[in-house]
Image: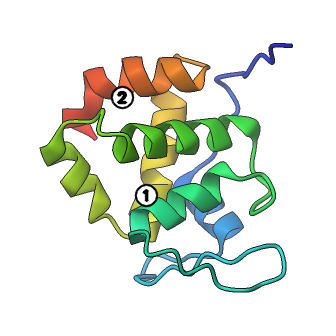
Amino acid sequence: MTATIEASETMTAREIAKALGVGTRTRKFVLRDEYGIELRDGSRRYAKVLAALSRSDMSDLPIRIHTVAYALRKCMVSGRMNAASENRIADYSPYQLCALVARIASECPETTIGGICDGWLLANHADL
């Protein structure tokens, strides 16, 4: 079964951040499970933010936002992305990561995780 993801399912950075519970000055992000218990897995902040954005049980966001966040996280943790771009993005604040996901969702024509991760992100990593 294949689902079609509309590229028009985009949101602003503010809307995404609000759904995740972060503000423009948020520096620390705590990832919690469905019971509210903090997950301490040693992941870096960017990985926790992108994990929360990519999970439908963590936030009420459109599937497009979940897909983009998952693809960005996959591209970064699997070593596909250019190291300089990966390090720069890894230092983004939680709000900046929400803004990046919003930007990718609005600019990227790809609709699949593979297309976003292995195609668009690899071609446009330097501009992110």
The answer to whether residue 71 is seen in the rendering is yes
Return the x and y of residue 86 as percentages of the image width and height.
24, 48
Residue identifier under label 2? 121
Return the x and y of residue 62 as percentages of the image width and height.
75, 42
The answer to whether residue 10 is seen in the rendering is no
Image quadrant holding the N terminus, namely: top right
Image quadrant holding the C terminus, namely: top left
Residue plotted at (57% across, 62% down): 14
Dot 2: within a 10 Å radius of its alpha carbon, few (fewer than 14), some, or many (20 or more) residues? Answer: many
Count of number-bearing discs: 2
In the rendered image, the vertical position of residue 41 relative to residue 96, given as above or below: below
In the rendered image, the vertical position of residue 19 relative to residue 72, given as above or below: below
Return the x and y of residue 101 as percentages of the image width and height.
49, 46
The answer to which image quadrant residue 24 occupies is bottom left
Q: How many angstroms separate mark 1 from mark 2 (CA)?
A: 14 Å
In the rendered image, the vertical position of residue 27 relative to residue 109, given as above or below: below
Q: Nearer the viewer, residue 119 or 1?
A: 1
Residue plotted at (52% across, 56% down): 50
Q: Secondary structure at mark 2?
A: helix
The answer to which image quadrant residue 5 occupies is top right
Residue identifier under label 1? 97
Dot 1: within a 10 Å radius of its alpha carbon, few (fewer than 14), some, or many (20 or more) residues? Answer: many
Say what amino acid the circle numbered 1 marks. Answer: Leu
Residue plotted at (28% across, 54% down): 89
Drawn side of residue 122 relative to residue 42, left or right: left
Dot 1 and dot 2 residues touching (CB under 8 Å): no
Say what amino acid the circle numbered 2 marks. Answer: Leu
Q: Earlier in the sequence, mark 1 or mark 2?
A: 1
